[in-house]
């Protein structure tokens, strides 16, 4: 018998497929006039696709203002004439690129996409503005012996490399995986698992595959490098978009797990591993009329584009446009 939860997942997926028929996929990197865009952003892989589409939608006075650059692609990007930089891959790299541009006062980067909030090492003078919500679950391969339903305590034990705490079930042979350094999903998942990035990098948890395998980066929200022993975090919005063909499918043979008995659906408010996703701007620009009209407040152009946010698998954030989170 098919469970009600599984039927709900199928219904949600069918609804998303239907909605996609009326809305195309976003372009990678800014395309079309004007070039360059006035406000260029880099960073998170998690939110690049939704923000690429938002950038195509947001046009104050009929002119597209945002340029959203993918996390991966060519080695360098040129956001404006004289502004060529290494392509920032991930939330941390995006925030660093924004801060570097502010320090240099070169006008090359004006905002960063981030799937994690303000951290202990976040540079001063930045405001993290939530625009959507996302959930994160764990992914395993379809042929793995790892259970498809775990408690959060199980997952914490797994990422602490402590097999005695995993549970009373079978003696699972598990290799926990973290995506590349600088990933917002990596940072968020470490927080949920109660581990510190510095400790991971110091090999305090030797069972963890730390951001690369066989010399290749493990990109967030990509299951192509996973084997039957692997377990890794995965954005539900990204998994949904990939499974429905809205963006490039990088899932490989992965399937999502259930945490604490609750399916990882964006529409399920009871799912415990849920986060805000942000656009990061200089705090000095919060009161700037151009930035404010696009980013700030529930009536901002980004918050008003809720149809695109939902179409890309994210949840509407009740605090969209809030500016109280800053470094």
Image (tube, rainbow, N blue to C red):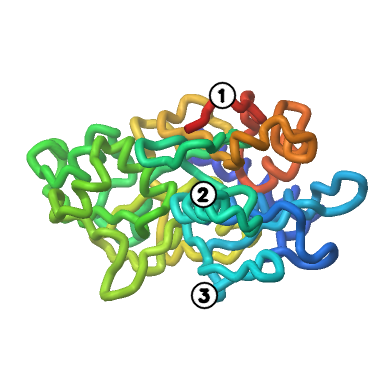
> How far apart are the two marked residues, 2 and 1, measured between alpha carbons?
19 Å
Name of the residue lying farthest toward the front: 104
The tally of labels here is 3
> How far apart are the two marked residues, 1 and 3, measured between alpha carbons?
34 Å
Crowd class of label 2 (few under 14; some 14 to 19; many from 20; radius 10 Å): many
- Marks 2,1: beta carbons within 8 A: no
Crowd class of label 1 (few under 14; some 14 to 19; many from 20; radius 10 Å): few
Task: Name which of mark 2 and mark 3 comes first in the sequence.
Answer: 3
Q: Name the residue that disc number 1 marks.
A: 324
- Marks 2,3: beta carbons within 8 A: no
Name which residue lies at 21% across and 50% down. Answer: 200
SS of the residue under disc 3: loop
Crowd class of label 3 (few under 14; some 14 to 19; many from 20; radius 10 Å): few
Residue 211 lies, with reference to residue 54, above or below; the image says: below
**Is 162 on the left or on the right of 77, as rendered?**
left
Return the x and y of residue 24 as percentages of the image width and height: 77, 59
Q: Name the residue that disc number 3 marks.
A: 75
The front one of 220 and 187 is 187
> How far apart are the two marked residues, 2 and 3, measured between alpha carbons?
20 Å
Instruction: From the image, state whether disc 2 or disc 3 is nearer to you.
Output: 2
Residue 25 lies, with reference to residue 59, above or below; the image says: below
Name which residue lies at 37% across and 52% down. Answer: 139
Q: Quadrant of the N terminus?
A: top left
SS of the residue under disc 2: helix
Q: Residue 264: which disc?
A: none
Can residue 288 be spotted in the picture? yes
Q: Residue 230 sits in which quadrant?
A: bottom left
Q: Residue 77 sits in which quadrant?
A: bottom right
Name of the residue lying farthest toward the left: 164
Q: Name the residue that disc number 2 marks.
A: 99
Task: Name which of mark 2 and mark 1 comes first in the sequence.
Answer: 2
Task: Name which of mark 1 and mark 3 comes first in the sequence.
Answer: 3
């Amino acid at each position: 018998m098919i469970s009600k939860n599984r039927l709900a997942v199928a219904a949600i997926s069918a609804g998303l497929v239907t909605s996609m028929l009326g809305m195309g996929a976003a372009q990678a990197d800014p395309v079309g006039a004007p070039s360059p865009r006035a406000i260029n952003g880099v960073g998170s892989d998690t939110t690049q696709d939704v923000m690429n589409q938002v950038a195509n939608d947001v046009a104050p006075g009929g002119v597209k203002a945002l340029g959203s650059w993918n996390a991966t692609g060519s080695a360098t990007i040129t956001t404006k004439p004289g502004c060529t930089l290494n392509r920032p891959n991930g939330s941390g790299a995006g925030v660093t690129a924004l801060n570097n541009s502010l320090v240099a006062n070169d006008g090359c980067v004006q905002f960063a996409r981030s799937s994690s909030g303000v951290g202990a090492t976040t540079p001063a003078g930045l405001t993290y503005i939530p625009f959507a919500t996302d959930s994160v679950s764990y992914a395993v391969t379809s042929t793995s012996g790892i259970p498809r339903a775990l408690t959060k305590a199980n997952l914490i034990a797994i990422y602490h490399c402590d097999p005695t705490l995993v549970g009373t079930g079978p003696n699972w042979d598990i290799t926990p995986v973290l995506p590349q350094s600088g990933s917002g999903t990596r940072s968020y998942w470490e927080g949920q698992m109660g581990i510190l990035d510095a400790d991971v990098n110091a090999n305090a948890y030797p069972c963890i595959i730390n951001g690369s395998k066989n010399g290749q980066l493990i990109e967030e929200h990509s299951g192509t490098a996973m084997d039957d022993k692997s377990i890794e975090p995965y954005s539900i919005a990204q998994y949904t978009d990939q499974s429905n063909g809205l963006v490039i499918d990088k899932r490989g043979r992965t399937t999502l797990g259930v945490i604490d008995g609750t399916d990882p659906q964006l529409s399920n408010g009871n799912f415990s591993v849920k986060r805000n996703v942000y656009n990061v701007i200089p705090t000095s620009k919060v009161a700037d009329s151009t930035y404010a009209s696009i980013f700030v407040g529930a009536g901002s152009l980004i918050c008003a584009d809720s149809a695109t946010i939902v179409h890309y698998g994210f949840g509407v954030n009740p605090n969209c446009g809030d500016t109280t989170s800053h470094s």
